[in-house]
Image (cartoon, helix red, strand yellow):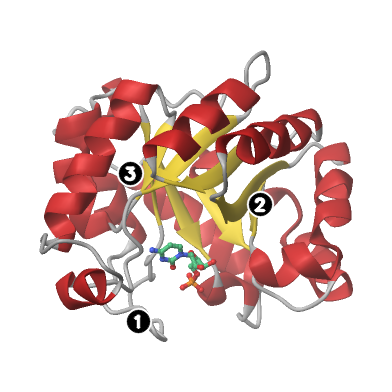
Amino acid sequence: MSNGLSLIPNPASGGDIRDRLIIGLDVPSVEEARSIVSRIGDAGTFYKIGYQLGYAGGLEFARELIGQGKKVFLDLKLHDIGNTVEEGVRSIARMGMTFLTVHAYPQTMRAAVAGKAGSDLKILAVTVLTSYDDSDLIDAGYAPIAAADLVAKRAEQARDIGIDGIVCAATEAQRVRGIVGRNRLIVTPGIRPAGTDAGDQKRVVTPAEGIRLGANHLVVGRPIVKAADPRAVAEAIVSEIAAA
Ligand code: C5P
C-alpha cells in the first residue's frame, strides 16, 4: 500500500476488513431493515441507523443487531446543552453502540467525551454539514467564513477535545487527516461503486478511492439497501476495500 494507509490504526475494526464498510440502513421500518440485514448475512458486520429508522423503532432494532454480534453506528448528530448531551451519550454508551455522531461544537464535543467515559463508544464529530456552503453559513448567522475553513477549525477543536473521529466527504479526507493525525478515525459517506447511481450525492468517489484518500470506514446506503442483491453489492465493496 503505497500511501501507508496500512499504518493507520483502525481501533473499531478488530482487524476484520468487513468492518470498514458501514451499511446505511436508511429504510422506514424495522421489518424492512431486518429483512435487508438477513439478506446481507455475514457480508455485513457494521450498520448505521439514522433519523429515519432511529425514530421508527430503530433503537430497539439496534439492540437486536448488537445481540447478533453486529456493530452499530448511531447517526443522530446530537447537539444540546452540555448536561443533556453528556447524559444522553451515557445512555447510548450503555446500549453497546460502537459509533455515535455529534455536531462539532466545542461544548457538545466536550460533553460527549465526558458521557462516553469508561465505555468503548467512539464519538464522531460532524464538522459542517456537506449540504452547507459559504452562503448557507452567512444565512445561519455566521461571520463570513469559508465552509472549508470552518471544517478545518472544527477538526482542530475535535482533535484537541479528544474526539475519536470525524465524518467528512472523501474529498475533504486528506486535509482532515493532516489535522487530526493518524490515530483518529475518518468516516466518509458519498461512496458509489463504479457504474451506480449517485442519487442526491454531489461529490461521490468509489470505495477504492475513498480508502486511498485515507478513510478508515466508508458509509454506503442506497447502493446496497436498494440493490436487487444487497449481499452481492456488499461483498463486492468489501473486496474493493481489501484490494485498495
Ligand atoms: O444512500 P447513501 O449511500 O447516499 O447514504 C449515505 C448515508 O450517509 C446517509 O445515511 C446520509 O445521511 C449519510 N451522510 C451523507 N453525507 C454526509 C453525512 C452523512 O450522505 N455529509
Which is more foreground, mark 2 or mark 3? 3
For residue 107, above or below residue 118: below
**What's the amino acid at mark 2?**
Gly
Foreground pick, 33 / 62: 62
Which is more foreground, mark 3 or mark 1? 3
Q: Are marks 1 and 2 in contact (CB under 8 Å)?
A: no
Residue located 25% across and 77% down the image: 139
Q: Kindly report the distance in space between the C-alpha atoms of the residues bearing marks 3 and 1.
A: 21 Å
Q: Residues within 10 Å of mark 2 (few under 14, many from 20)?
A: many
First reached walking from the N terminus: tag 2 or tag 3:
2
Please give the residue where the numbered disc 3 appears in the rendered image.
Answer: 215
Please give the residue where the numbered disc 2 appears in the rendered image.
Answer: 44
**What's the amino acid at mark 3?**
Ala
**Where does the image place residue 154, in percent across and percent down from the top left?**
27, 42
**Where does the image place residue 170, in percent across and percent down from the top left?**
27, 56
Q: Residues within 10 Å of mark 3 (few under 14, many from 20)?
A: many
Residue located 42% across and 29% down the image: 163
Residue 195: mark in rendering: 1
